[in-house]
Amino acid sequence: MTWDRSVFHIPNDVLHMTTTLNTLITSLHLDSSDPIPLRNVHAAVMRKVLQWCTYHKNDPWSDEDGVGEGLLSRWDLQFFNEDQATVFELILAANYLGIKSLLDAACKYVAKLLAGKTPEQIRQMFNIKNDLTPEEQQKIRKENAWLEY
């Protein structure tokens, strides 16, 4: 049950992807049909989580391996092509629910968005105010000269 009191039935072939729910069911000896309160996830995000997990339920990676070194599929790129807030809520939900493969995929998507961007472009993208002095900026550039902008 999500924080906004929506109840979702999670099929067993999707349930295995979430270590948090599996641990709760096992540790508390719950029936898989018992509602589990998920105070950190709301219904719209849970729908997206279940959509992603259903699509990827037969993928070869394990929960420990995440999505590996491969590129995101076209389906994943379209799936994550949401507003920034939704993508970051998916990251938080994946972390909370213990879905490493979703967490890795969402973080790869964000990394792809940031690749090749200058610090100024990233600030604009996330509406971050630049509160560094020119001297502080120069010091940071010097300390991180090995990074490519």
Image: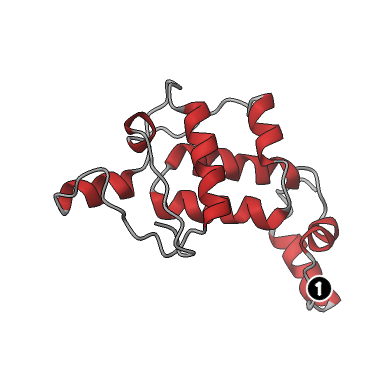
In the image, what residue occupies the spot 32% across and 44% down?
Answer: 19
In the image, what residue occupies the spot 47% across and 48% down?
Answer: 94
Quarter of the figure with residue 57: top left
Give whichever of 1, 131 is nearer the camera. Answer: 1
Task: Classify mark 1: helix, strand or loop.
Answer: loop
Structural crowding at the residue carrying mark 1, measured as other residues with C-alpha within 10 Å and reported as few (<14), some (14–19) or many (≥20): few
Q: Is residue 25 left or right of residue 84?
A: left
- Please name the residue that numbered disc 1 is placed on: 130
Q: Examine the rendering and report whether any part of residue 68 can be seen.
A: no
Above-or-below relation of 62 to 144: above
Give whichever of 71, 146 is nearer the camera. Answer: 71
Above-or-below relation of 77 to 137: above
Q: Quadrant of the N terminus?
A: bottom left
Q: Position of residue 81 (x, y in %)?
A: 73, 41
Q: Amino acid at mark 1?
A: Asn
Q: Is residue 22 left or right of residue 2?
A: left
Q: Position of residue 133 (x, y in %)?
A: 82, 79
Q: Position of residue 8 (x, y in %)?
A: 42, 47
